[in-house]
Image (cartoon, grey):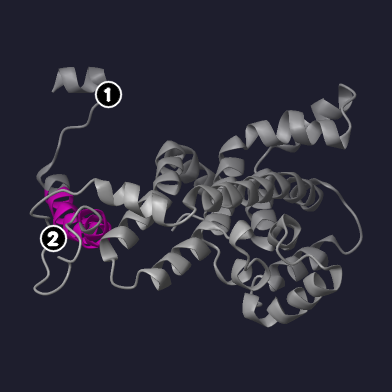
Amino acid sequence: MNLLRRLGAEPVTPRKARTTLILALILIPAAFVVLVPYLWMFTTSLKVRGTTGLPPYLFPNAFEFGNYLKAWQAAPFLRYYLNTTIVAVAIIASRVVLASLAAYAFAFLRFPGRNLLFLLFLGTMMIPFQATIIPSYLIIRDLQWFNTFQALIVPRMVDAFSIFLLRQAFISIPRDYLDAARLDGCSHWQALWKVVVPLNSASVVTMGLFAFLFAWNDYLWPLLVANSEQMRTIQLGLQVFAGRYQTEWTYMMAGTVTATLLPLILFLAAQRSFISGLTRSGLKG
């Protein structure tokens, strides 16, 4: 007991052990339910062609790793990945810059109507995308941006949620830090990028991860403005691939597995920053 006190560890009480056991009994089945669709997707991608019907089975009798090569050759997935990566990187960069500027203004600058304007920004979060899709489409048509990266990127360069997330993180910074930066001769621009953003790097990473997942999984808007083969994103490519090979579920699942790899890797790599960013922004459940 003395050794535990010296090490700063608390002894496990029977009540804490029961609580841990109950949580484990709840979370382990829940995790299994969440993972089963992904496990089914992966194992189906390795099954022999034409063996995915009834009766259903989870683990393949033989592992056909060649399904990935056949799926890759059946459609220009490299072009789809390149287009989606360009769009995602551009959206992340623009949101980091523009949302940081707006969040800094709402958090630290004093100007007439600041709170009202911020409420208006928050109000746009309650407007569904379907309500604005027709005006956005008409603007893209008038600008003659169909089948261009501008059509995929510009309407998604900033959103109210990114501003709200960073603003909630920025207001947690003591005002003394900014006053010290101003005394050292920093402008608002320098204070933002040399003080505020570095102190809230976890929140910036969280916002960037949200932006990446949004851009990577977006389907409806690219379907409307980028229907050419050269401008399709990965989600459009998978849909066309599914239409082309409606019965070839092994190839379809192989393409889907490759499409989920990059988001999964990024989430696992940024998991700690993601949780920290949500905590600092006051959005944890």
- Main secondary structure type of the part rendered in magenta: helix
Q: Is residue 69 above or below residue 196?
A: below
Q: Point out the tag, 1 or 2, that comes first from the N-terminus.
A: 1
Image quadrant assignment for residue 17: top left
Q: What residue is drawn where x is 15% and y is 48%? A: 63
Q: Which mark is residue 58?
A: 2
Secondary structure beneath dot 2 equals loop
Tell me residue 126's x, y (percent): 64, 75
Mark 2: which amino acid? Leu
3 sits to left or right of 253 = left
Work out which quarter of the rendered image holds the C terminus and state it. bottom left
Report the span colored magenta: 18-43
Of the pair 70 and 138, the residue shown nearer to us:
70
Q: Which residue is mark 1?
A: 8
Of the pair 234 and 246, the residue shown nearer to us:
246
Q: What residue is drawn where x is 75% and y is 44%? A: 97
